[in-house]
């Protein structure tokens, strides 16, 4: 039985007991819900991989509260990383450093680096402070499914597989944290998110972006996998392909297929009487709505027709990265 509890003294006690016993606990963050376990307990970390069905070469992020001394976990913190931490943490930015080897080697899948995240969500801070241990946590979904942005989403994926979900409401950020490699001369974005490459560059003068190419050794192994996919057919169109997208909708709807369009604020005026969901007008709104709309879509429709938003750059890089990973295939006649 999986329990969902609001975050209070009682549920935190329960959560701490579970973590100390080597069990997992789902908890909210400002990005998506995480599935946490004691990062120093190899058996507990292995459970995370099992529960999610996660490939064992995709490393986990370690979460700590804001007063946790990370020099306990990592060796070098370059000057630029201190500046970035001062500006953006707690917040949706994960920083990768050289590991001290304090946590279980399973966390980083044998890499000599460690990804550390200090979430800003009040419930996450309370949980992490209460257990006062480094907590390894991926997103609390079945591997390759859409990430969860509510306790109900976690339950839908992990019911019966975990004991406790701490309910901290709906995640406002909506897409996973930016992952930033801080082991080199300049920071390099490994996964885009709400802290954009441009924001990092503006703060410390330079920031690279890692682009994974098929077949190469991935700097951030998670990038190799198809991710975030809804469990229904999805077709993706470019911003100027409205006609083609609407034609597909009409063709499928005539056969009785329950189709739904996902588009941005500009797109709304094109969809006519067809069923649609609006991602939002700003990149932040789109990030916030994306996963809940994909989950709503897979639960209520047979076909999601995604029309790419026009905007690009900044936070939009993160939104487009998730959208293409979820709905990747482009529609061809
Ligand atoms: O917002 C988030 O980051 C959420 C919440 C729960 O904090 N967590 C999350 O975890 O998205 P996960 O496991 O779904 O994604 C972790 C990403 C993967 O792409 C993984 O490859 C990368 O971080 N990563 C973890 N450790 C790494 C390391 N040592 N070096 C490079 N990439 C790493
Ligand atoms: Mg994930």
Image (spheres, rainbow, N blue to C red):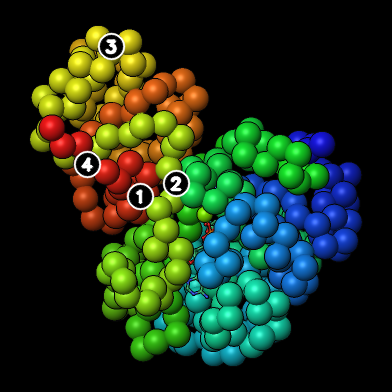
Q: Position of residue 302 (x, y in %)?
A: 39, 23
**Left or right side of 139 for 105:** right
Q: Position of residue 234 (x, y in %)?
A: 33, 34
Q: Which mark is residue 255?
A: 3
The reply to whether dot 4 and dot 1 touch (C-beta < 8 Å) is no
For the residue pair 24 and 192, the one nearer the viewer reads as 24
Q: Quadrant of residue 60?
A: bottom right
Q: What residue would you read off at disc 4?
A: 330
Please tell me which of labels 1 and 2 falls first in the chain. Answer: 2
What residue do we see at 76% from left, 46% from top? 162
Whole-Å distance between the Cαs marked 4 and 3? 21 Å
Q: Residues within 10 Å of mark 1 (few under 14, many from 20)?
A: some
Q: Say which element carries label 3.
A: loop
- Answer above or below: position of 315 versus 241: below
Q: Does the beta carbon of the residue at mark 2 sit less than 8 Å from ligand 2?
A: yes
The reply to whether dot 1 and dot 2 touch (C-beta < 8 Å) is yes
């Amino acid at each position: 039985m999986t329990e969902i509890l609001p975050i209070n003294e009682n549920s935190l006690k329960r959560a701490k007991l579970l973590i100390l016993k080597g069990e997992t606990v789902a908890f909210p963050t400002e990005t998506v819900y995480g599935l946490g376990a004691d990062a120093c307990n190899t058996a507990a970390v292995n459970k995370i991989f099992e529960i999610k069905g996660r490939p064992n070469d995709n490393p986990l992020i370690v979460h700590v509260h804001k007063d946790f001394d990370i020099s306990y976990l990592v060796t070098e913190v370059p000057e630029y990383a201190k500046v970035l931490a001062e500006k953006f943490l707690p917040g949706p930015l994960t920083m990768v450093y050289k590991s001290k080897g304090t946590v279980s080697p399973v966390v980083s899948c044998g890499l000599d680096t460690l990804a550390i995240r200090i979430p800003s969500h009040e419930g996450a801070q309370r949980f992490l402070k209460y257990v006062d241990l480094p907590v390894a946590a991926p997103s609390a979904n079945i591997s390759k499914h859409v990430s969860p942005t509510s306790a109900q989403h976690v339950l839908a994926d992990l019911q019966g597989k975990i004991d406790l979900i701490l309910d901290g409401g709906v995640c406002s950020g909506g897409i996973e944290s930016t992952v930033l490699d801080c082991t080199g001369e300049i920071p390099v974005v490994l996964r885009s998110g709400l802290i954009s490459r441009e924001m990092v560059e503006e703060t410390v003068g330079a920031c690279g972006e890692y682009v994974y190419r098929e077949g190469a050794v991935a700097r951030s192994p998670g990038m190799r996998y198809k991710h975030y996919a809804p469990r229904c057919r999805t077709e993706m169109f470019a911003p100027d392909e409205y006609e083609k997208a609407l034609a597909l909708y009409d063709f499928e709807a005539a056969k009785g297929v329950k189709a739904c369009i996902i588009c941005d604020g500009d797109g709304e005026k094109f969809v006519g009487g067809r069923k649609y969901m609006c991602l939002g007008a700003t990149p932040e709104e789109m990030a916030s709505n994306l996963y809940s709309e994909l989950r709503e879509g897979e639960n209520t429709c047979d076909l999601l027709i995604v029309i790419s938003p026009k905007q690009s750059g900044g936070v939009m890089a993160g939104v487009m990265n998730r959208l293409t990973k979820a709905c990747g295939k482009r529609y061809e006649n």
